[in-house]
Image (tube, rainbow, N blue to C red):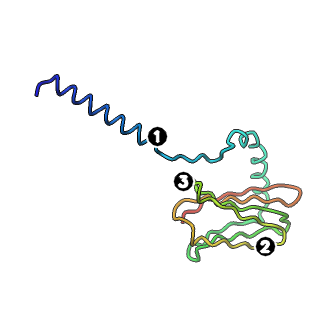
Amino acid sequence: MNWGKSIILVFVLFAGFIGTMVYQMTRQHIDLVSDNYYQNELQFQQHIDRVANARHNLSTTMTYQADQQQVVFVLPSTLQKGEITFYRPGDRQQDFRVKISAQHPTRQVIPTRSLAKGNWRVQFTWSDGQREYYKEEQIFL
């Protein structure tokens, strides 16, 4: 085989490799954090205020108990309404929410047995009727 055929063969193999990579990249599924990304960005100052409020409120704790496969929330007594979101960064289909109202006790337990193994973000948003609060922790199951 001479040099001319070898160079053409290398170019054909390289083009095939690039074509294969482009095909695989277009088939890759990518989840966005939120469908309303830009609208949420405009409301970011409210989120900053919620986080600052939660830092000053020490009556709320979130604890992952790996041995019992559960997440325990100690809720403030002034809670009017709230929501716990389990956010899976790698797969939006596994995300779920738990609504909390004032009738719930000050301790909320959520089992993690049925959750997929890996990284989760547990986001807790609540209100006492006057202020809103936000707390987030990462757990690895």
Identify the secondary structure beneath mark 2: loop
Task: Report which quarter residue 108 is drawn in.
Answer: bottom right
Q: Residues within 10 Å of mark 1 (few under 14, many from 20)?
A: few
Mark 2 and mark 1 lie on one chain; the one further toward the N terminus is 1
Identify the secondary structure beneath mark 3: loop
In x, y percent, where is residue 76? 80, 67
Q: Which residue is label 3 attached to? A: 90
Q: Which residue is label 1 attached to? A: 26
Report the residue at 17% width, 26% height from top.
5
In x, y percent, where is residue 89? 57, 53
Q: Amino acid at mark 3?
A: Gly
Task: Report which quarter residue 60 is drawn in.
Answer: bottom right
Q: Nearer the viewer, mark 2 or mark 3?
A: 3
Q: Is residue 55 left or right of residue 66?
A: right
Q: Residues within 10 Å of mark 3 (few under 14, many from 20)?
A: some
- From this view, report whether residue 49 is shown above or below residue 39: below
Of all residues, the one furthest to the top in this rendering is 4
Identify the secondary structure beneath mark 1: helix
Q: Which residue is label 2 attached to? A: 106
Task: Report which quarter residue 75 is drawn in.
Answer: bottom right
**Real-space Cα separation, disc 2 to disc 3, in angstroms:** 31 Å
**Real-space Cα separation, disc 3 to disc 1, in angstroms:** 18 Å
Report the residue at 41% width, 39% height from top.
23
Q: Residues within 10 Å of mark 2 (few under 14, many from 20)?
A: some
In x, y percent, where is residue 13? 26, 33
Q: Amino acid at mark 2?
A: Thr
In x, y percent, where is residue 72? 68, 71
- Which of 131 and 57 lies nearest the eye of the viewer? 131
Mark 2 and mark 3 lie on one chain; the one further toward the N terminus is 3
Q: Looking at the rendering, in which quadrant would you find the N terminus?
A: top left
Of all residues, the one furthest to the right in this rendering is 130
